[in-house]
Image: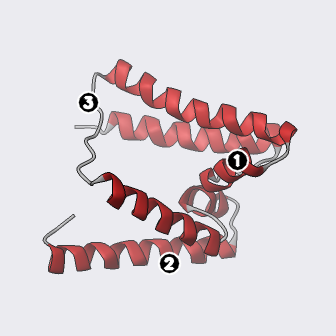
Amino acid sequence: MFPFWPVVGGILIGLSAVLLMVLIGRIAGIAGIVWGALTGTEGDRVWRWLFLAGLLLGTLLFHSISGRAYPEINASFPLALSAGLIVGVGVRMGSGCTSGHGVCGIGRLSPRSLVATTIFMLVAIAVVAVMNTFVGGV
C-alpha cells in the first residue's frame, strides 16, 4: 500500500520550509521559531506565532480529514517534561534542531548541518539499541 499521508506530510514540510525562506528569508527550524516567539522583538514574534498556530491547526485538520486517531502518549507527564527539557538543552548546545539542521540545513548544503544531522541520527540509533537491549523496548 502506498504511504499516502507520509508523502503528503513530507511534501508539506518541504513546501513550508521553502516558502518561509523565499517569502521572509527565515529558516524553518522549529526550536528557533519557538525561542523567538517567546523572546523575540514584538514585530518578529507575529510570524512565529502564526507559524506555530499553523502547525497545531494543521494537525487538527489532518485528523479531521484522514479520520485517523490522535496518537496516544503513554509516558507520564514528569517523564515527558524531563525529556523535553533534555531535548531543549541539546538543541541549544547543537545550535539548532532536527528541522533546522535536517530539513533546512541539508537542503542548503550546510556542512555543519550535515554533521549535526549525522550525530542526531547516530545517537538516536544508539539510544534505541540501548533501550531495546536493557529496558525492554521503546
What is the secondary structure assignment of the residue under circle 3? loop
Residue 94 visible (yes or no): no
Residue positioned 82% across, 41% down in the render:
44
Q: Residues within 10 Å of mark 2 (few under 14, many from 20)?
A: few
Residue positioned 56% across, 70% down in the render:
89
Q: Mark 1 sits on what residue? A: 38
Marks 1 & 3, CB-CB < 8 Å contact: no
Q: Residues within 10 Å of mark 3 (few under 14, many from 20)?
A: few
Q: Mark 3 sits on what residue? A: 69
Q: Nearer the viewer, mark 1 or mark 3?
A: 1
Disc 2 to disc 1, C-alpha distance: 28 Å
Residue positioned 28% across, 54% down in the render:
76
Q: Nearer the viewer, residue 38 or 101?
A: 38
Image location of residue 69, percent across then percent down? 26, 30
Residue flagged by tag 2: what amino acid is it? Ile
Residue positioned 55% across, 71% down in the render:
90
Left or right, 92 with reference to 11? right
What is the secondary structure assignment of the residue under circle 2? helix
Image location of residue 128, percent across then percent down? 28, 72
